[in-house]
Amino acid sequence: MSALAVSPFATCPGLFQPSAAQDGLLLRLRIPGGLLTVPQCEAIADLADQFGGGYVEVTNRANVQIRELRAGITTEMLDRLQNLDLAAPLAAVDSLRNIMCSPTAGIDRLQLLDTRPFVAAWNRYLTTRPDFAVLSPKFSVCFDGGEAVSVRDRPNDISLVAVQIGEAVWFRLHLNLGDRGAAPCDVKVLVKPEESLQVLSAIAEIYRDYTSAIDTTKRRKPRLRELLHDWGVENFLQAVARHLPFPLQRSERTDNGSLTNGYQHLAIHSQRQTGLSYIGTILPLGRLETQQLRGLATLAAHYGSGILRFTPWQNVLLPDLQTSQIAVVQQKVEQLGLHTSATHPQSAIVACSGTTGCKSSATNTQADALALATYLEEHIALDCPINIHFSGCEKSCAQHHTSDIALVGVAQNGYEAYHVYVGEDASDEDSTKFGRSLYQNYAFTQLPGLIEQMLRVYQNQRSHSQETFKHFVNRYAIAELHQMLSSSSDCGLMGVKG
Ligand code: SF4
């Protein structure tokens, strides 16, 4: 057996550096762009069966996690994973964050360019540079090709976002200047796609030199945004320009664009390729049993192009299906025990690992989230995805941006309770990273009834059928929401008003 190092400081586990969790060792495999071939799926399923808990978890960066490992994996398995490009050629850079692109890159009807070759090229470059091992493992890059399923708002250090200017397609450079979980901002730089890897390389080298000058034995490695705050964006961009053999193209204006609902990849959609469609399938809390993973891989091999695509919303796409066969494939997906409807209550429920995986958790978020989804399925018909985020503590590992409803676990006299947040209000100083506080210390036993009531009030009182839950709750003061909920039910009395 190989001896894998387990570091108590491995806050970002990789394949070569698992971290210790409540339920055993945790391994994470980088899946650039979330794209997996059938042989890769088979190897991951074998890995989870032989060494882990017999299931995989898809993360919010479209990585794959294997939990419940009791010992290191064998060198034979490591070799197999490396030969299949499931591990970096250099172990030291394997824990750098996964490279993100839209799960519909190359098949999206609205895309301006196919970002998959850029993801592959940047991954090859990044994972063969030993000097980049010094970077924070949170260093993260995203390519957005202008798809309907946009990833431009996902938290990344750098996003290159495709835009059309005249006849040409360019990338706009977005850099993350904000807090943890914030979306990167347009910094008024245009990049020719064919020069994008040189620009990324220049940024990584400047960041490497900045990090190397810091004694990281005494403090954690700096994030790229700390360098940007330290130097200022303009000085940083001038340094990037000095690294390049061509001028850095500046833009007069910013373009942060408009965003779409992130769950629109679920269910059946036509591809840009005539006669082909994809099916977006829900993975409950990102979890996939190995027999389901093998089943999806078999469907991809038989009906599709032999590819699965994991999404940053912790779901999976089965692409390149003949539209004429789509109903047959959908039925076979559902026979694997997976749902494909975007309005199924499981579609947009997110939870961190909770007490089973994390000692910081006050609540069993995973079990509570699944129990809530089951309750909602039995009690209410949704007509749009509702993003409900369970977090076992304030750290918010599972989702960094605000949700429709956030539930944050608290220890409450030996029973499970949650603080309840809704919507968001940047102008309200009482608004938290989870949103606006609605109730505190709400007993979990009463929570499903409360959520059902909230959703009924929303469905009955929204201004029009397209009004989002977040927009709806943001229109009301918290006291008004309390009033609306208590006049339609008494379940709101079980918590302390926020
Ligand atoms: S949010 Fe808190 S409880 Fe949940 S996994 Fe992260 S640290 Fe653990």
Image (cartoon, rainbow, N blue to C red):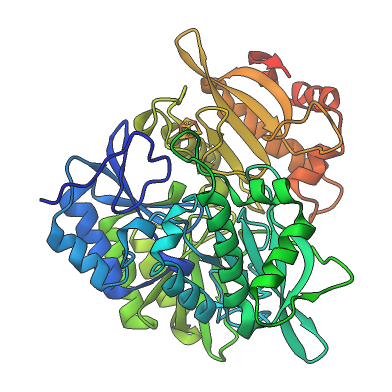
Q: What is the residue that sits farthest to the front in this orientation?
A: 213
Q: What is the residue that sits farthest to the top in this orientation?
A: 413
Rendered location of residue 189, percent (x, y): 77, 71
Q: Is residue 101 above or below residue 16?
A: below
The mark tally for this picture is: 0
Residue drawn at (75%, 44%), measured in percent from left and top? 470
Q: Is residue 197 above or below residue 226?
A: below
Rendered location of residue 147, percent (x, y): 65, 74
Q: What is the residue that sits farthest to the left in this orientation?
A: 1
Q: Is residue 275 above or below residue 372?
A: below
Which one is in front, 496 or 446?
Answer: 496
**Residue 317 visible in the current orientation:** no
Residue drawn at (54%, 48%), measured in percent from left and top? 213
**Residue 284 visible in the current orientation:** yes
* Rendering quarter of residue 87: bottom left
* Rendering quarter of residue 110: bottom right
* 245 relative position to 281: left or right: right
Residue drawn at (57%, 49%), measured in percent from left and top? 348
Q: Quadrant of the C terminus?
A: top right
Rendered location of residue 105, percent (x, y): 56, 76
Rendered location of residue 57, percent (x, y): 38, 51
Q: What is the residue that sits farthest to the right in this orientation?
A: 252
* Rendering quarter of residue 34: bottom left
* 255 relative position to 37: left or right: right
Q: Is residue 20 above or below residue 360?
A: below
Which one is in front, 220 or 401?
Answer: 220
